[in-house]
Image (cartoon, rainbow, N blue to C red):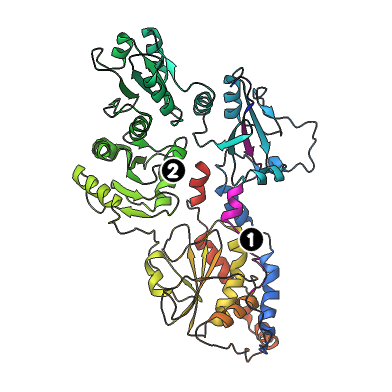
Amino acid sequence: MANRLLILLAFTALFLFSNSVLCKDSKGKDVVNDNDDDDDEDLSFLEEADAKGEAASHKFNPGQDEAEDQYHEDDDDFGNFSDFDDSGLDQDAYKEPEVDDKDVVVLKERNFTTYAAAATELKGENVVLAKVDATEENELAQEYDVQGFPTVYFFVDGVHKPYSGQRTKEAIVTWIKKKIGPGINNITTTEEAEGILNSEGKVVLGFLNSLVGSESDELAAASRLEDDVNFYQTVSPNVAKLFHIDPEVKRPALVLIKKEAEKLSRFDGKFDKSSIVEFVFANKLPLVTVFTRENAPAIFESTIKKQLLLFASSNDSKKVVPIFQEAAKSFKGKLIFVYVETDNEDVGKPVSEYFGVSGDAPTVLAYTGNDDAKKFVLDKEVTLDSVKAFGEDFLEDKLKPFFKSDPIPETNDGDVKIVVGNNFDEIVLDESKDVLLEIYAPWCGHCQALEPTYNKLAKHLRGIESIVIAKMDGTTNEHPRAKSDGFPTLLFFPAGNKSFDPITVDTDRTVVAFYKFLKKNASIPFKLQKPASPPKSESTDAKETPESSTPSPPKSESTDAKETPKTSTPSDLKDEL
């Protein structure tokens, strides 16, 4: 490796990437399906409604800014957006935070302290840590298919592979040393053994007949496939004894030691690369992982996709966590068992809200992982037998999915119908209705900007019995037919065709454009009649009626007031990962 140039390259960004995906531009795309050149309908009254609403939609909305600021307030990776606005600043007076960053090849100005710490420890190891600001180096980011930030690649002789380990100094250093070194280290003295056992969280030790040869080669080959566990070998009986291996045991012997509830795992398979890797993979994780911000990536980005999560308070954990740990022994390498402390101020509430878990009683939830994000709830008391049976049914796909839902509204008489998870089938999948559904988030500024237009559309169409204009809070409600790629998402469910996927509404966000889309795609034909009373007479009536001179709050503002309380969202969790 001495003649190779080894580079660990991190692509970073100075803006919040996830927000551009989760809260979409409310203007939408150009109309693609709604060029009704043959339609002679007089839609001037709808255009007038758009013109009146346009000014209102551009008014300053302090609630919107506050909501979005609160939504991103915990995004420590990217800091305050004001940091990136250099207008009016004295550039000479601006200074970066004082961090020891000298051992990183600085390609752009903003640095990660974790990355810098790893660079310092690897100094002299014939490896270079570098970073690129992908917002400036767009072509380079596109060349290497950078999809999110930070993205870390490891280059050897110009060939790169992604780094998928934890974003800590220790994890980065261990991963790189394993890639550039022999992959395995010798332990010859008890002093060395004691130092390793005291300093490392999990280690593999092979007690071999020789430090060279086929046994060592198989162990070294296995070590290169396990990025987050250090491998050692020894021929010393005294060292083996410290690792809880019988000095008289038949060699080769192998153990995995962790600083966890299950401290020791003994290997009893064939001593070859694949068997060793399978053993380490199945036993390296703790029986139960306590959910934290730091270990979230290890949980959700693990190659073991399926998880069982226990939600319980710190008091209840004394009773149920030991049960959970015992059950986990039957699912090593198949399921990840995770404990979420519900009264933990840092993660308890947002994680519980994201998964739709409420109440104080211990709850066990199965999760298929971020790819399809299906959830299943154990509807029995948490016992060893119930958890094990639940895990087996989960692996065999015998469980019924669980979907989040707000309570069904007691009244739902507004022009825009309120949809929640539990009334979705009744309203949206009604075969006798053409249904336009907006999936929104209370914190989304584009959703708030769309609301006046959406309300006007619903008001104009409230006399059309075959059409339903509806909306659903996508942060607190779920349904298998309501899939969104961000907020707002607009879906159209034609009458008589509810078994098919809905149509994604891809049109301008105006009353006229929405009306034309519905006219073209609705299964049940309809035509909107121009109001009989001209707007001028309505204005005259308003002047003649004393009560009308006192303005009442617009309906859309009232709706906003009900929807804007801060709630946890999927992005909260993604940003942690």
User: Which residue is rendered at x = 57% and y = 28% of the image?
Assistant: 114
For marks 1 and 2, give the CA distance.
Answer: 29 Å
Where is residue 164? Give x, y as percent: 51, 37
Q: Secondary structure at mark 2?
A: helix
Q: Secondary structure at mark 1?
A: loop
Residue 88 visible in the displayed image: yes
Q: Which of the two labelled residues, at mark 1 and mark 2, occupies the earlier sequence position?
A: 1
User: Which residue is rendered at x = 44% and y = 50% of the image?
Assistant: 370
Direction from residue 310 to residue 76 in the image, left or right: right
Where is residue 393? Give x, y as percent: 26, 52
Where is residue 60? Give x, y as percent: 68, 59
Direction from residue 367 to residue 551 in the image, left or right: right
Q: Which residues are drawn in magenta?
A: 7-32
Residue 552 visible in the displayed image: no
Direction from residue 27 to residue 265 in the image, left or right: left
Q: In the image shown, does 261 or 372 lie closer to the viewer?
A: 372
Numbered badge on residue 300? 2
Q: In this rendering, is residue 403 above or below 350? A: below
**Disc 2 residue crowd, few under 14, some 14–19, many 20+, Cα 10 Å:** some
